[in-house]
Amino acid sequence: MSAMTRASCLCGAVTWTLAGPVPAMFHCHCTRCRKAHGTAFATYVSAPAQSVALEGTGDVTCWRPPQGGDNRCFCRRCGSVVPYSVEDTVFAPAGNFDDDPGVRPRWHMFVRSRAPWYEIRDGLPRFETYPPGRAAAPVVDRPSLDPPGRPRGSCLCGAVAFIVEGEPVRCRYCHCGRCRKALSAAHATNMTTALDGVRFTRGEDMLARYQVPEARFFATVFCSGCGSPMPRRHPDHRFSVVPLGSLDDDPGARSTGHIFVASKAPWFDIADDLPQQPAYSPGE
Ligand SMILES: [Zn+2]
Ligand SMILES: [Zn+2]
Ligand SMILES: [Zn+2]
């Protein structure tokens, strides 16, 4: 275990270090985490505020929920989630670590809010909301909508909304280092659909895009108001990618496998028995 754990956002503008042993790591399935990270669940470590040193704060934007609850902070250049504090505790997203923090996830919380398209397969303790004895501000769940037609999606702050009009083509978990940093999570859960299969119904002008300079294809699109990952078009590949955590309705599709498992986070174990590809695979 290293005494100093380094982390950074996808574009590198915001960096932070955690000094000393990291006390706790956990998965959260609440709707706010799912939207802020655009995937099945978020994984955070909590640590005393004085053990975290954040640099590049000029690029940090925080969204303050009008209904109350924790602020959500992100890099305004690339959309990565960055640590936020609640009183004297800092919550840092595990997906951004450059080093192995030495701790492993210890529980799942807010499983009552779990995505309908995600099944928890590991043996960690599960809590309906917070673990017993952890006092915290209540999280306001968004009511899940009864799908009358095509699945709808929206960002955390609600400024951006869309409908997936195209059929789901493929749905997989991606463990590549860029997805992990872009979403600040253990892995992405992405669905592909036709290039013009996503229609924005509001807030399209709020979308920000970050293109990784050295990558041929990798880009991320997020709401500039809250940082939530949003669908993006890939004209080169002739499809659009929908980060499933942004959906309000069940798309019906389920993940059929894992890709880029050679880049998997050291602190995350795959507990299901879906096929695993070491890198990209165009097929199932
Ligand atoms: Zn950044
Ligand atoms: Zn959460
Ligand atoms: Zn937003």
Image (spheres, rainbow, N blue to C red):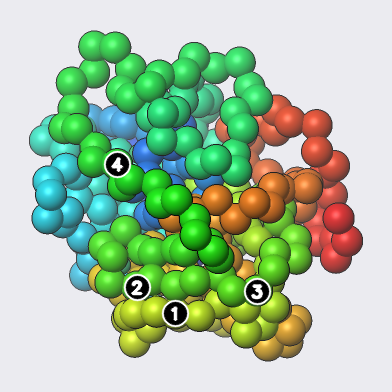
Q: Is mark 2 within 8 Å of ligand 3?
A: yes
Determine whether the residue tagged by mark 3 lies in a helix, strand or loop: loop
The quadrant holding residue 200 is bottom left
Instruction: Please say if 202 is above or below 179.
Output: below
Label 1 vs label 3: CA separation? 13 Å
Checking the image for residue 166, the label placed there is: 3
Asked whether residue 140 is in view, the answer is yes
Q: Earlier in the sequence, mark 1 or mark 4?
A: 4
Q: Earlier in the sequence, mark 2 or mark 1?
A: 2
Label 3–label 4 contact, CB within 8 A: no
Q: Which residue is mark 2?
A: 160
Q: Amino acid at mark 1?
A: Phe
Q: Looking at the image, which residue is at 80% across and 31% down?
A: 273
Q: Which residue is mark 1?
A: 200
Label 2 vs label 1: CA separation? 7 Å
Q: Looking at the image, which residue is at 60% across and 28% down?
A: 120
